[in-house]
Image (tube, coloured by chain):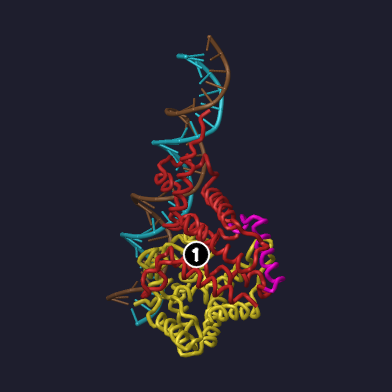
Chain colours: A red, B yellow, C brown, D cyan
DNA sequence: TTTAAGTGAACGAACATTCATTTACATTTG
DNA sequence: CAAATGTAAATGAATGTTCGTTCACTTAAA
């Protein structure tokens, strides 16, 4: 029996995400993908049932990689300031180390696939995050508020900053934009201050 | 000479945005759009040069409507807390009053069209925003920071909250989500607190 | 009567998916 | 050890469909 060529599957995945990031979902056609990956169209269908399956499998795997990176050295019993610093570090590091994969996930989040995409978040990841804010509230380090309000204030600024960075610009008229450590620290500090009682 | 049927152009615009919001950019085909709008395919080409032109014209007009709504009763010389309250009110109101249009703009912002899309922001809108934060810093109401850091901390939480609301949910496991005034106030308060020296 | 709005049919290109065939490797056989 | 065999990987061509766009034509109002 002939074994699968791992390099081919990797090429499919990589090029598919590149196409989606650079040209959007309408830029991902099976023929174009095959040409970009240097394989035959039919080969894609050995690995994936159809186009939809390919997209969802990509999302599933990258979501897993993302959540694993996000939980690195994280412990829900950390102090609030420590935990927030860890989360901002982990999340921004994942984005900057894996810009294609992270931007692909962001495209998913802002597409009709969104509902299916968040379903890939593992229970233990969600529970760790909920336990963290529960502890912080209990310890008087965090104002009590709905999960959604916390998430919006705590992390949305981080993702926006990283998006500005990867876009290379923010507003027309403002110059090119390059995120640095000082800005990240400043934003994190503001967020912590806002969330602290 | 036969006059243009305004209702037809409106139907095209409305249905195009609906298709993009509900099915993504690959869901917007000219044939499907014509069928949805109850007109002939060729009619679309009377109003728009091609598919790309249609998308960009939609974006241009909706961006204008959005910035006009955002500037309502806004004055850069307002106090920081007043100005922020005005902006959160204006921006959330536009989203909730025009969910299709707002979500269409958000799809643009997270697509390869993004660069063209931000170019539609009028200079006076940007200048008003910049003057507002300049004044606030001068008056000691706002910590000095790069525009991008400010924007991320000040508004990204708002857009994330509204997105949770329109999605109807946040994380799997968390129940359905409905944004209310109290949550909005709480988030705004946190943001202002974080940005104040 | 004039003129632009509006149309349905038609164009070739690109699309997702399938299929008969070939290829390359692991295993079995001599 | 080498040749034959089995099998899933890999393929290019082909299928039928949908795509964006155009065009010769009809319609309606100024």
> Chain under label 1?
B
Where in the figure is residue A105, as x and y percent of width and height?
52, 58
Q: Residue at x 44, y 76 (%)?
A: B147
The local secondary structure at tag 1 comes to helix
Q: Nearer the viewer, residue B78 or C30?
A: B78
Q: Residue at x 63, y 75 (%)?
A: A196
Where in the figure is residue A71, as x and y percent of width and height?
60, 57
Where in the figure is residue B56, as x and y percent of width and height?
40, 69
Q: Residue at x 56, y 78 (%)?
A: B194
Tell whether A137 sits left or right of B41. right
Can you identify the residue that label 1 sits on? B20
Image: magenta residue range: A116-140
At label 1, counting other C-alpha atoms closer than 10 Å, the crowd grade (few under 14, some 14-19, many 20 or more) is: many
Q: Is residue B170 positioned above or below B63 on the image?
A: above
Q: Is residue B100 positioned above or below A120 on the image?
A: below
Tell whether A110 sits left or right of B174. left
Q: Main secondary structure of the magenta part?
A: helix
Q: Nearer the viewer, residue C7 or D6?
A: D6
């Amino acid at each position: 029996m002939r074994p699968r060529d791992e390099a081919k599957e990797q090429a499919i995945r990589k090029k598919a995400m590149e196409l989606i990031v650079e040209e959007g979902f309408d830029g991902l056609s099976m023929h174009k993908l095959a040409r970009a990956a240097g394989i035959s169209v039919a080969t894609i269908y050995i690995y994936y049932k159809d186009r939809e399956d390919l997209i969802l499998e990509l999302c599933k795997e990258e979501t897993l990689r993302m959540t694993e990176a996000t939980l690195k050295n994280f412990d829900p019993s950390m102090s609030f300031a420590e935990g927030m610093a860890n989360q901002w570090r982990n999340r921004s590091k994942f984005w900057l180390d894996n810009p294609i994969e992270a931007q692909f996930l962001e495209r998913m989040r802002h597409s009709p696939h969104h509902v299916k995409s968040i379903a890939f978040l593992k229970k233990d990841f969600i529970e760790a995050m909920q336990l963290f804010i529960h502890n912080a509230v209990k310890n008087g380090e965090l104002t009590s508020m709905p999960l959604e309000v916390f998430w919006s204030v705590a992390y949305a600024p981080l993702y926006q900053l990283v998006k500005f960075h990867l876009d290379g610009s923010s507003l027309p008229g403002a110059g090119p934009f390059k995120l640095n450590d000082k800005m990240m620290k400043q934003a994190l500090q503001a967020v912590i201050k806002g969330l602290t009682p």
